[in-house]
Image (spheres, helix red, strand yellow):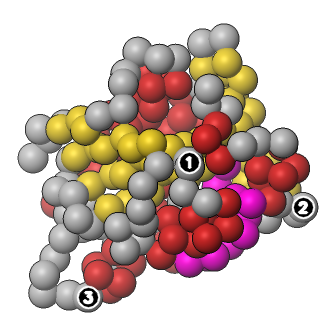
Amino acid sequence: MIKAVIGLGNPGQKYSNTRHNVGFAVVDELAQRLEGNWNGEKKSGAQITKVMVGEKKILLVKPQTYMNNSGEAVLCILSLNKLKPEEIIVVADDINLELGILRFRDGGGDGGHKGLRSVAENIGTRFHRLRVGVGKNVKQSAEDFVLMPIGESEVDVFRQLVDKAGQNLIEYIVGELGCKTVDLNIK
């Protein structure tokens, strides 16, 4: 049973509108839909809110460490809340998926994503993942691409993507959506 959704991103306004922060955007969408109020928690190094998804109490989390150290905050959240890795979903951007693809996975590797690698190094690989396809730009390094602000021409696509990811997470948590790839066809 899922008890927490953890969105990966980088803290600070500088990163708020980047592909790398799509994990934060998705949990922000859930918090808004489910009337959650974010609170900073010094012990865990994260922003946290508790919401109800159907009859289930769910913890929403935005680690306030930088992406590459996300696992430290995730480990702390699990410890403080007595959660097991298999009771969480980690939401992260994925440049290996086309823009508009959502992929749920139980366990697995990091796919080259340093935030997911940090989480796996700290808690193991038995956590659920929602990978959010943000596309790839072969003319730039992956690091530069994911940290660039989302261009005006893609803002609507990202809004739809975040909205659909939020809806799919709710369906996944209440058991209406199995673990699968979802193509949004929003291009």
In the rendered view, does 79 fall on the left or right side of 61?
right
Q: Which residue is mark 3?
A: 141
Asked whether residue 155 appears in the rendered view, the answer is no
Q: Position of residue 145 (x, y in %)?
A: 28, 79
Residue 119 placement: quadrant = bottom right
Which one is earlier in the sequence, the residue at label 3 or at label 2? 2
Q: Position of residue 76 (x, y in %)?
A: 80, 59
For label 2, the crowd category at 10 Å Cα-Cα, with few meaning under 14, some 14 to 19 and many 20 or more, is: few
Q: Residue at the spot x=87%, y=50% of the render?
A: 80
Residue 43, label in figure: 2
Q: Residue at the spot x=72%, y=69% of the render?
A: 72
Given residues 168 and 74, the one toward you in this image is 74
Residue 31 placement: quadrant = top right
**Tags 1 and 3 in contact by the CB under 8 Å rule?**
no
In the rendered view, does 33 fall on the left or right side of 178?
right
In the rendered view, does 81 fall on the left or right side of 187?
right
Q: In what element is the residue under mark 3? A: loop
Number of marks drawn? 3
Which span is picked out in magenta? 61-75
Q: Which residue is mark 1?
A: 127
Which one is earlier in the sequence, the residue at label 1 or at label 3? 1
Residue 171 placement: quadrant = top left
Q: CA distance from mark 1 to mark 2?
A: 22 Å
102 over 122 or under it: above or below: above
